[in-house]
């Protein structure tokens, strides 16, 4: 193997290695709903697609990535995985698929995270209920945003940030 070939292989391996993501909220982008709709169209035939997370709530600052929840009969089905790979998504853990933002993505280049859940999974209802709460209740959306801004400054790791939001989400859902 030539040195040039080895360098290229190392670059590819390095680019594929998951890295910690810095938590940084960006102002709401009015193009997010349209971009989510384009992704829902791209994912047609894979499963039932729901735009969730902060990018699904107009006016809410968010991490610069669309969160899509896709309900399927079997998240481990090879046909589902092949379909996601055909749509330029890469696996990143248990039933999580991602795609970075690309410059030629159009008017709203945004990273995408697709979470697969089984149809009928009990985790679906609270996610959709929370999204709908934030869409209809400006006070809840404001409280959530204030907490998230504080947490974003406190956590440099996306996983820790997401875990820290859990009690806030639970409290807001309880009312």
Image (cartoon, rainbow, N blue to C red):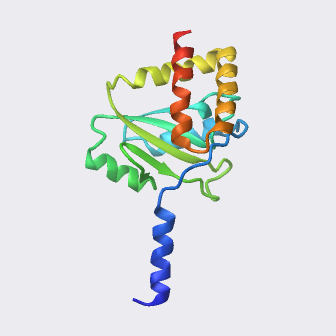
Residue 164, visible in the rendered structure: yes
**Relative to 146, does residue 73 appear above or below in the rendering?**
below
**Relative to 70, does residue 82 appear above or below in the rendering?**
below
Farthest top residue?
Answer: 175
Asked whether 173 or 154 is in front, the reply is 154
Residue 37, visible in the rendered structure: no
Q: Position of residue 175 (x, y in %)?
A: 56, 9
Q: Position of residue 64 (x, y in %)?
A: 63, 44
Q: Position of residue 37 (x, y in %)?
A: 55, 38
Asked whether 112 or 145 is in front, the reply is 145
Horizontal side, residue 113 vs residue 45: left or right: right
Q: How many marks?
A: 0
**Relative to 164, does residue 114 appear above or below in the rendering?**
below
Horizontal side, residue 94 vs residue 163: left or right: left
Q: Position of residue 116 (x, y in %)?
A: 38, 38
Asked whether 10 or 136 is in front, the reply is 10
Horizontal side, residue 159 vs residue 46: left or right: right
Q: Quadrant of residue 122?
A: top left
**Relative to 40, does residue 102 appear above or below in the rendering?**
below
């Amino acid at each position: 193997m030539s040195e040039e070939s080895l360098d290229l292989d190392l670059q590819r391996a390095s680019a594929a290695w998951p890295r910690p993501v810095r938590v940084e909220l960006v102002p709401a982008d009015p193009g997010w709903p349209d971009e989510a709709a384009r992704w829902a169209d791209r994912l047609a035939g894979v499963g039932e697609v729901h735009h969730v997370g902060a990018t699904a709530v107009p006016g809410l600052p968010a991490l610069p990535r669309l969160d899509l929840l896709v309900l399927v009969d079997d998240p481990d089905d090879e046909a589902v995985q092949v379909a996601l790979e055909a749509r330029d998504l890469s696996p990143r853990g248990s039933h999580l698929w991602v795609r970075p933002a690309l410059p030629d993505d159009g008017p709203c280049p945004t990273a995408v995270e697709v979470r697969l859940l089984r149809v009928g999974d009990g985790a679906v209802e609270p996610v959709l209920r929370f999204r709908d709460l934030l869409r209809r209740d400006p006070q809840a959306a404001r409280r959530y945003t204030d907490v998230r801004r504080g947490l974003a400054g406190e956590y440099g790791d996306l996983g820790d940030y997401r875990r820290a939001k859990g009690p806030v989400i639970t409290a807001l859902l309880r009312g």
